[in-house]
Image (cartoon, helix red, strand yellow):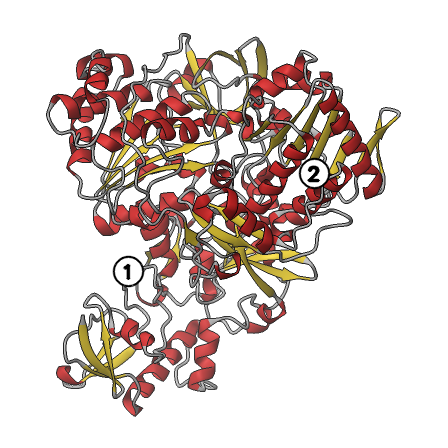
Amino acid sequence: MVNLTIDGTQVTVSKTATIYEAAKEIGIKIPVLCYAKKLMPYGACRFCLVQVEQMKGRLIPACTTPVSEGMVVTTTSEEIEKVRKTVMEFLLVNHVLDCPVCDKGGECDLQDLAYEFGSTSNRFEGEKFDLPTDEVNPLIERNMNRCVLCGRCVRVCDEVVGYGSYSFINRGFETKIATAYDRGLSCEFCGQCVSLCPVGAILPRPFKFKARPWQIKEVDSVCGYCGNGCTVTLGVKDNKVETIRFNDEIGVNDGNLCIRGRFGYSYVNHEDRLTKPLVRKDGQLVEVEWDEALQVAADGLAKAQQGQGAGILSGARLTNEELFMLKQVAKTLGTENLDNSGGECYKGVTEGLKETLGVAASTGTFPQIEHADVILAIRSDFYETHPVVGMVVNQAIRRNEAQLLVVADKKGKLDKLPREKTLLSQPGLELDVINAMCKVLLDEGLAKTDGVDGVEELQAALADFGLAEVAKRTGVDAAALQTAAKQLAGAGNAAILLAYGLPYQGLSTELATAAANLAMLTGIAGREGSGLYLCGEKANSQGAIDLGILPQGNGLGARAMLAAAAEGKLDALYVVAEDPLSSYPDRDSIAKSLENVPFLVVQDLFLSPTAEQADVVLPAASFAEKDGTFTNAERRIQRVRHGIKSPGEARSDGAILTSLAGKLGSSLAFTGSAAIFAEIGKEVPAYAAFNYNEIGPQGVVWGGETLQPASRKLVAVAGGVAADGDFKLVTGSALYHSGTISTRAKGPTAVLSEAYLELCREDAADLKVADGDLVKVSGNGTELKLKAKVGNRLPKGVVFTPYHFAEAQVNRLYKGEAVIPVKLSK
């Protein structure tokens, strides 16, 4: 720690702090434009100039100067104020004065400083900028006439996002910030540049001319998309979410968001939202009152339970409190047939980690990743599924010089980062690579086996996973594989990352088990500062596991329920916040299940393809319309808060479940989310330590920052299975979408509006296919036509398609395999 004096006040701060940070800690405000706490010090604007006694009163930038023992700092004086006003005059020489029509008006840092300095005139004259406005893309508007050259957009895109869209070009008065070749912006559209721009140079187009900041009500909640659990601040006006506001003071994401979190909010305002219950009469779904719909639903489910039984399929975007209520409804019905998210993708957690480590959750927290020395990402898709965690990985590389290892069947965003090494494997054989890494550690005496069971058994089971054999099967270089294993074993702090979700069901359990083996052998599991991270596709995937939304006793899982329905052995299905027909693997079998089940109740935001088949449709609320908690992939429980009222007569899932339970003859009379959370604590010990009303802006983490394994048992898993055929199809997530709900949001669909088939240039040339051409994809007894997307990230013979778009029916091809042999033709 360091002691210094600022404006006569003594302060003790970390030796890594800057003068600006030290002053802020004691409430002294130093004006800045280029500073942002998530970025490295830069010192471009010179507004933060201060005097230091030990430097003979010389003016120095507070945001870049580290503190030192005994330093005496003056932050304001006649000389300092004079220099700051001069800096302001220089900035305003060329700056256009269009505040009345600039969307940044009212929250513009330059505007605030001009008011603070009393800048009503200028001693200097110059020609105002007259540069063209970049409105090429649908989400971000760039007006460089308003730019103050603070460099925040350049730095955040490089230091945090790792994309590098922007750079300074030209010199002197002609200097400006531009994209490559000064073309229109084409990037990830995460909006990080929007959030950090201190003026109106970079603005969100969907919010243009919607409101001034003082007209907006801000509501802090949690993003409803992936399991990262990012805090989002809803900007609400006239009962509509008009924008997502930047807030880096609360939450675990430091204000970072991806395209889905920043621009994917509009589905909550969508005109196609269900607003009234529907009941099928004479073959048609017609609007009815709530009481009638609930009675029909209750009667049908109760009748089914008296016959061959009912099953409940849930999504993982319900709050913990709603999941608890759903479980109570299952108990009221007397059914043990309960499952979530298709019933297979999460088994890497509930079976893989449970069998090996004795826990069913990630062992570390996301901030620890930034301090890792080595990071292993299994599948390149991890950035696509969890972009903000990917940003943390980028920061670890750039700030901590971490080594990134990627085991994948294709290249991706992670492969473009510095200090990265990709072990590019044949599709479906990533498991062999992980097994081989385990064998290297055991064979070379690098494994940490104290207190670990099953060492000899695993060593025997890995006999066929020698470097040479695995290199031949997978295509991964043997020396690179050996080096990667040694780097992971030798790291002080390390992280292993693996995402799971509906398009990643193939080998989900096996990959998680192998990753847990590797975590034990490297000492990562349970070590402070290190962690094994299994990150779910949905906002409350971990909560669904914690709450036990799984088959109970001898109950059927999702696949078994759907199979029973198809065979006429299940009399009813209650589908909550899910669209199996659009997103579950094997669409044709799902369609048969929904057609054959005698009674179907669907509870959702939209009349989805699954809801169209229902006997009763119950309109539900979005994440922006409810209170409760989500548990993210690092076990962090966070508050979800309602910002708007639901459209029409739509109700929260919790309210629907309470009313349905009443119709079934059971009273679930809980007085709000806090009371339900207290009840959860009685059934889930990890939650018992927390009080709902005391969950603060950072949330609370059950199990502590580092979750200690309950056991350490190595479990052997067989290798993957290579697919035969000229082309191998893999499916997964696209960066711009999450599940199917994002296809209802204007932001993500403005960038990616339909499915595609991605293939390498060599394969495209062989097939005589160009970008946008329709390609026939044949496999698994079906044929689809998808538009070609020709690129550089896929190996020859490997093709990829995202699963998000219901109309493309990709899940007719995808039946849960890790890789699908297909034939392509133009």
Quarter of image, res 237: bottom right
* Crowd rating for badge 2 (residues with CA inside 10 Å; few <14, some 14–19, many 20+): many
Q: Residue at 55%, 21% (x, y): give it.
A: 554
The spot of residue 378 in percent (x, y) is 33, 30
Type of the residue with mark 1? Met
The spot of residue 611 in percent (x, y) is 71, 31
How far apart marks 1 and 2 lie (CA) works out to 44 Å
Q: Is residue 808 left or right of residue 302?
A: left
The spot of residue 436 in percent (x, y) is 23, 20
Q: Is residue 578 left or right of residue 13?
A: right
Q: Nearer the viewer, mark 1 or mark 2?
A: 2
Q: Quadrant of the N terminus?
A: bottom left
Q: Is residue 459 left or right of residue 300?
A: left
Relative to 172, residue 622 above or below: above
Q: Nearer the viewer, residue 681 or 370?
A: 681
* Crowd rating for badge 1 (residues with CA inside 10 Å; few <14, some 14–19, many 20+): some
Type of the residue with mark 2? Phe
Residue 532, which numbered label? none
What residue did someone put label 2 on?
A: 606
Relative to 636, residue 340 above or below: above
Quarter of image, res 458: top left
